[in-house]
Each structure stands twice: as C-alpha cells, then as structure tokens.
Amino acid sequence: MEQQAKQNENKVKEASQEELLRQQAELRLINQSIVDGAIELIKEDFNKYSTELTNYFKADQISTNPKIDIAYPFINDYLEINISQPILFSAFPYFSEELRRKLMENWEFEYKDTRVEIVDYGKSRWDERQLPTFIIDLTYTMKNNILGKRESLCKRIAYMDDSGYESFRKWEMNECETSDYTIYKEKNSFISEWFLEK
C-alpha cells in the first residue's frame, strides 16, 4: 500500500515536471525573437569593436603610423579618438582596456569560436517600471602565435533595455565562472521569463 502511494506520488511529480517543461518551452518560444535581438546586439558590438582594434594593432600599422606612439597611454588616447565605441564597450571601459592590452602583447582574435548565448531573460524593476533584462554569456578565443597558446575567455553580461528612452540600464560584467548574478537579480526584483520554477 505504502509502495503504491509512493509510485503514485512519483507519477504526479513526473507529470507536473513535464507540464512545467512544456510551459517553459512555450514561454521561450514567445520571447525568442526578443532574446535573439539582444544576442545579435552583443555579437555585432563585439565583432565591430574587436575588428577595429585588430586593424589598429597590426604590427605594420603601428610601425608606420606616425600618429601612434608605442607608449601605451598614447596608443590608448589615440584609440579613444579614432575608434567608435559601440554600446558594449562604452559601458565597460575596463573590458576595452583588457582587449587592447592583449592585442599589444601579440594576441589575436579567432572569430570562428565566438559565441553569444542567453543565460536568462526576464523583467526587472527600474524607476517604478518593468524593463526587459538580459543576462548573456560572451565567449571568445584568442591565440598568440609567438607563445604558441590559445585562450578561451568568457564574460557574463547583464543589462536592462530601456528602449523607450533609447538607453541601457544597470550594466554589469563579470567572468562567467565566478558569477550567477543572484545578487543582481535580487536587488533589481528580476522575474525570469526564460525559466519556470515550481
């Protein structure tokens, strides 16, 4: 009798889990185009900026361009003036700095391995309004032919899209493996529209 009750309880749990997954799949289908747009934004920003940086850091350009001084601060100032700053990089100047240092140390991008993936999507509270909020992983690979090394790097990015005011709010970036953005979600009253929980 007790064994039968347990079996019935397990069946109910399995059925409710299946229903939860079905509802979650429907929810993701509804929000897929919104998520795809955010992924495309990050991908375009990264590709555009990294390509421009690479062009400026090619050895022949550095050695022949009189506007670029080999001293790092001067190169940095030159790039601030001459390279457009897409949304992703103007929001995270230290990330721009990190990429520039890598290129100066003879690292280069391997674009075929660049991935942008959704971690979570939902709504967060900002100034009495609910704003679409994205948490996205940007994974990219760099190689150094001189050192004979490759590095796979991953940044987790969170932001709110305030399209009504043509702005992005509450940008954050961390290493993928060190952050699940629990604190970010809690302090911004985040409600997922990508995952369903019982």
Image (cartoon, rainbow, N blue to C red):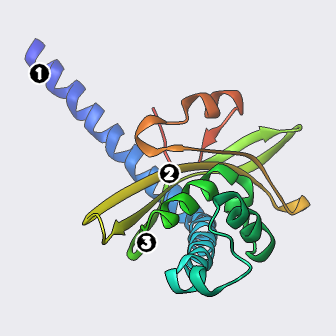
Q: Position of residue 167 (x, y in %)?
A: 84, 58
Of the residues shown, which amino acid type is indicated by label 3? Glu
Quadrant (top left/top right/bottom left/bottom right) for the N terminus: top left
Instruction: Judge whether 38 appears above or below 95 on screen.
Output: below
Q: Say whether residue 179 is left or right of residue 11.
A: right
Q: Which residue is mark 1?
A: 4
Quick one: 28 or 39, which is closer to the camera? 39
On screen, residue 139 versus residue 63, left or right, reads: left
Q: How far apart are the two marked residues, 2 and 1, measured between alpha carbons?
A: 49 Å
Question: Which circle's residue, 3 or 2, is located before the other in the chain?
Answer: 3
The residue depicted at 61 percent of the width and 87 percent of the height is: 64
Circle 1 Cα neighbour tier, 10 Å, few/some/many (<14 / 14–19 / ≥20): few
Q: Residue at x 62, y 34 (%)?
A: 185
49 lies above or below 169: below
Nearest the viewer among 107 and 32 is 107
Residue 137: percent from the left, percent from the top? 49, 54
State the image coordinates of residue 22 (x, y, percent, origin top left).
Answer: 40, 53
Residue pointed to by mark 3? 108
Q: Which mark is residue 155?
A: 2
Q: Earlier in the sequence, mark 2 or mark 1?
A: 1
Is residue 183 rendered to the left or right of residue 139? right
**In the rendered structure, which amino acid carries the disc numbered 1?**
Gln
Amino acid carrying mark 2 in the image: Lys
Q: Mark 3 or mark 1, which is nearer to you?
A: 3
Q: Secondary structure at mark 1?
A: helix
The residue that appears at 70% across and 57% down in the rendered structure is 73
Q: Residues within 10 Å of mark 3 (few under 14, many from 20)?
A: many
From the top left corner, tell me how far across and down residue 31 is, in percent: 59, 62
In this view, the mark in front (2 or 1): 2
